[in-house]
Each structure stands twice: as C-alpha cells, then as structure tokens.
Image (cartoon, rainbow, N blue to C red):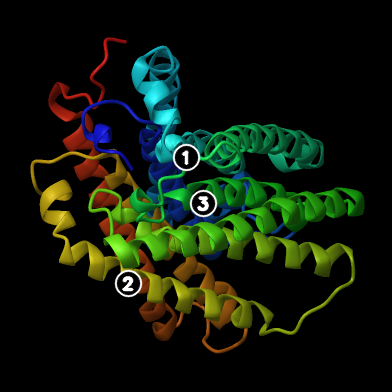
Amino acid sequence: MQPQSRTGYVPLYFLAALGAGGLMVTFFLYLMFWVPHPGQTVPVFEDILAAFLAGTPLTRAMIVTAWAGIATFAFLMFRSLVWNLRTLAAFRATPGFDALMGSNAGSQLMAVPLALAMAVNGGFILGLVFVPGLWNAVEYLFPLAMVTFLAIGGCGLRLYGRFLAARIGKGGIDCASNNSFSQTLPAFAFAMVGVGLAAPAAMSAVKETVAVSLMLSSFFILLALVIALVTMIMGLRAMMEHGANPEAAPTLLIAIPLLTVVAIAWLRQSHGLHAQLDMHGGPAASFTLLLPLLALQLITGLFGLTVLRTQGYFARFISGPERSPASYALVCPGVALSVMLQFFVNKGLVGAGVIEKFSAVYWAATTPALLVQVATIALVLKLNAKHFGGGRTPIALAV
C-alpha cells in the first residue's frame, strides 16, 4: 500500500466490484439452502418459481428478497467493474501507473483478475436464478466456463509473473514497507479462479468434465495456498519489526475470504469425486473440513480487528474524513464469513445430523450469518457514499 492511494486511482478499487459480487452470493445462498432443488446440486429458475408459487407468505418474501438482492448487487458489481476497467485504461497512460508498478504496490493489479473471476461467478448465478431452461444446456456451458476461467487465470499468471520478475528477478522488494498482508492479494485472485474452475466438478454429470475441472482447479487452489503461505510469513515478519501499515491494515483479514473460497472449492471437488469418481466420504466429512477452516477465520478476525481498533482505522477511514480504497478490503471478510457460516450450518451441522434443518436451533445457528450479511451491506453502502457519493470521485485524473 502506498500513500498515493488516497489521492488518485489505484486498482484496489476493483474490490468494490468484488464486494458487490460477494453480496450477490450471500443472497443466492437463501435459495441454495432454503429452496428444494431435486435433480441438481443448485437451484434453478424452475425450482425457485415452483417454491414461490407453492410457498407460504414467508417463503415468498424470502425468495423476493433473494431476487432483489441478487439483482441489485449484480448491477452494482457490473457498474463498478465497467467503471474500473475504463478508468484503469486511462490510468495506464499516466506516470502514476509507472510509479505503482515500480513499487511493492504493483501487485494491486491482481485485483483485476480477481474481480473478473467474481463477475463470471456472478453471471452464472444470474443465469441459474433468472434464465428458464438453463440447466438443459448446462453441460455445454461448463467447458465454456472453464475456458473463460483459464483465460482469466492465464492473465493473472502473466501479471503476477511480470511483478515477480521486476521485484525479485531484478531486486526491489521493500521489505520494510511490506508490513501488511497486501502481497497476499494474488493468492486470493488465483483462489477465485480455482473455485470457478471447481464448479463443474460439483454440477456436471459428465465424468470427463469433472476430471478436467478437478485437475485445473487443484492447480490454482494449490498455487493460491503456496503464495498465501509465503507472503503472509513475509508480511508478519515485517509487521513484527515495523508495525502494521495503518492504511493497509484491512489486509490482515484477507485469510477470511481466502479460506472461504478454498473451502467452497474443496466442497465442490469432494462432490465431484463422490458423484462421478466413486470416492465416498462419511456424513460428517463436510463438518470435519469446515470446522477447522471456520476456526482459523475466527482467529484471523480476532487478530485483525484488534490491530484495526488499536490503530483507530474505523474512526479514520470508515466514519472519519479520510478516504482509502483499501477500505473496500473490509467487505470481503464480511461476505466470506457470512458465506462460511451458512455452509457450516447447512453442509456441516445439518449434513452431519447434528441439528435438524429449519428447527429453532437451526435458525439460531443461522442468525450470525444473517447479521454479518446485514452489517456488510451497511458497510458497502457507507463506503460507496463516502467514495462515490455526492459527485465525489476517488480519481485525481481527467478521464
């Protein structure tokens, strides 16, 4: 993170599109876990419409809320993505871009493939929810989706390769200013590509498609984990010596979204192995997978929030007058924790037979996920108003 991020455009603003796309997912999970969808692993338009027509007023209200949430945040995601792509194109022609790429902050460009991968995932959700008959053609869409994710992943590999070549191959990593987890952003980007590539493993009925999905997604997930391990150790070492960078402090929570994306990828791979490759796990397999990952997220949250509060981050950059694009990095942990809690309750606790679905205990266990979702929506609205409302613009360039 560089101080310039508060005075001009930086690629971190792609996180605004990412956060909106993540909130789409939180509303889709209403349909995923609360609407019956026999015959496929995800709900489609026909399932949702049937549940709406036959449902109680409460069920209909839930479905309308999900529809509205998905549509609203899809609009915000694509609007932000288009604005960022246009602004980045203009920014590339300025000296500020050269300065960015000549520093540690050059890895921020990995926010581009990260947001693009989220947009593809979001587009698939829109198709499932709003397009009749999509599932009839889904086996033809899976190869196309994998090619798209591979293109995004290839773009990410090229961008990250250039960054490493410039910073490591020629020297120039400023370890003293690497006092955050900002260098873990590329890991998050590759993990997002990996989870997209893992989707056919969970949903396809063609063994060859499942096998290709497993192989490709495994590459990007393992790449993400290696990068995350190395960069977080480097960042923690710098923070121990120099303290955490106040503006980059939200990156201390990056393990939360990273772990959620990895968990979903592993769940998708596990389903493919079970359904098509005859590799079976017990009823508690998802519970034993999700429990340690959720625990790690909570530990990360305690650590990161402690540092943020100690440095007065919220008073400065959220409720205070200062603006930083890094504030959008706080949206991802909220989205990710809400999603992980939903999966832990439905795939973990319910799947293992610990609690009964739709019981009082079930709704009590689901409440934290809904509260985190509402808080994250409030944060997004506040950040959008702070950075883009009232005619304000974060960019100090004429574009």
Q: Position of residue 187 (x, y in %)?
A: 56, 51
Q: Position of residue 95 (x, y in %)?
A: 36, 16
Residues under labels 1 and 3: Cα distance? 62 Å
Q: Which residue is mark 3?
A: 53
Q: Is residue 294 above or below residue 170?
A: below
Q: CA distance from mark 2 to mark 1?
A: 29 Å
Give the secondary structure at mark 2: helix
Asked if residue 33 is positioned above or below residue 216 in the image, the reply reads below
How many callouts does the rendering have? 3
Q: Are marks 2 and 3 in contact (CB under 8 Å)?
A: no
- Mark 2 is surrounded, within 10 Å at the Cα level, by few (under 14), some (14 to 19) or many (20 or more) other residues, namely few
Near-viewer residue (256 or 29): 256
Residue type at numbered disc 2: Phe
Within 10 Å of disc 3 (Cα), the crowding (few <14, some 14-19, many 20+) is few
* Rendered image: mark on residue 172: 1
Q: In the rendered structure, which disc, 2 or 1, sits on the residue that comes first in sequence? A: 1
Front position among marks 2 and 1: 1
Mark 3 belongs to which amino acid? Leu
Residue 133 lies, in percent from the top left, at 70, 38
Image side of residue 365 versus residue 247, left or right: right
In which quadrant is the C terminus drawn? top left
Residue 303 is marked as 2
Label 1 crowding class (10 Å Cα cut-off): few <14, some 14-19, many 20+? few
- Foreground residue, 372 or 189? 189
Query: Given the image, on which type of amino acid does mark 1 rest?
Result: Gly
**Image quarter for residue 224?**
bottom right
Quarter of the view holding residue 102: top left
Identify which residue is drawn at 79% across, 56% down.
Answer: 214
Give me the residue at 63% from left, 46% from top. Answer: 46
